Amino acid sequence: MRYLVWSLPITVAAAAFTYWLSTSASSDVGSASRAESYDIEEGALLYAENCASCHGAGLEGQPEWRTPGADGRLPAPPHDETGHTWHHPDSLLFEYTKLGGAALLARQGVEFDSGMPGFADVLTDQQIHNILAFIRSTWPDRIREVQAARTEADEQRGEN
């Protein structure tokens, strides 16, 4: 019974968070969410230094990444084709990485600590772009095409 009392609010919070990510309008990070070029090699090195400890050296994420832990946080998701990273436009991925989950969600009026820290004080905008370019470079062509289309649609809506 105790499990049921805690599992419902956690499930609702996780569902709200997932819904928000899938429909989110971009915040005011602005033009920093775009880069003219990418350095995938640097992105791979920076990923290993800053991201792999949570998201896995092979981008595999943490076990049971769809199930909130006892603290209500979702484990780090995979960034390979089995995860949901590719479901989001570049602007959201950039902002989420730069600001962190709690800060970005707070800008949208959602109080939820996803566990994702912000890297604004650790990485430059270009370095964040390079990491994201590295992640995208590992996806199969079809997934890259879908994600690129979502990014293009986001840009056409003027949400970034």
Image (cartoon, rainbow, N blue to C red):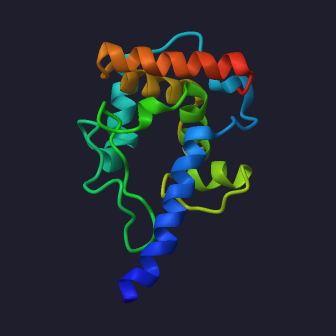
**Residue shown at the point (43%, 29%) measured from the top left:** 86
Lateral position of residue 42 relative to residue 25, left or right: left
Query: Is residue 85 among the parts visible in the rendering?
Result: yes
Q: Residue placed farthest to the bottom in the image?
A: 1
Up-down relation of residue 106 to residue 160 (above or below) = below
* Residue drawn at 38 percent across, 74 percent down: 70
- 132, above or below 15, in the image: above
Q: Nearer the viewer, residue 47 or 14?
A: 14
Q: Which quadrant does the C terminus fall into?
A: top right
Residue 100 in view, yes or no: no
Image position of 83 (left or right of 159): left
Q: Quadrant of residue 80?
A: top left
Rendered position, 78 above or below 80: below
Q: Going by the picture, which residue comes out furthest to the top? A: 36
Q: Residue at x 74, y 28 (%)?
A: 30
Residue 113 sits in quarter = bottom right
Residue beneath the point at 55% across and 54% down? 17
x, y (%) of residue 154? Answer: 64, 23
Q: Position of residue 143 (x, y in %)?
A: 36, 21
Residue 61: x and y in percent read 30, 46
User: In which quarter of the view is residue 46 placed?
Assistant: top left
Marks counted in the figure total: 0
Quarter of the rendering occupied by the N terminus: bottom left
Is 111 above or below relative to 26?
below
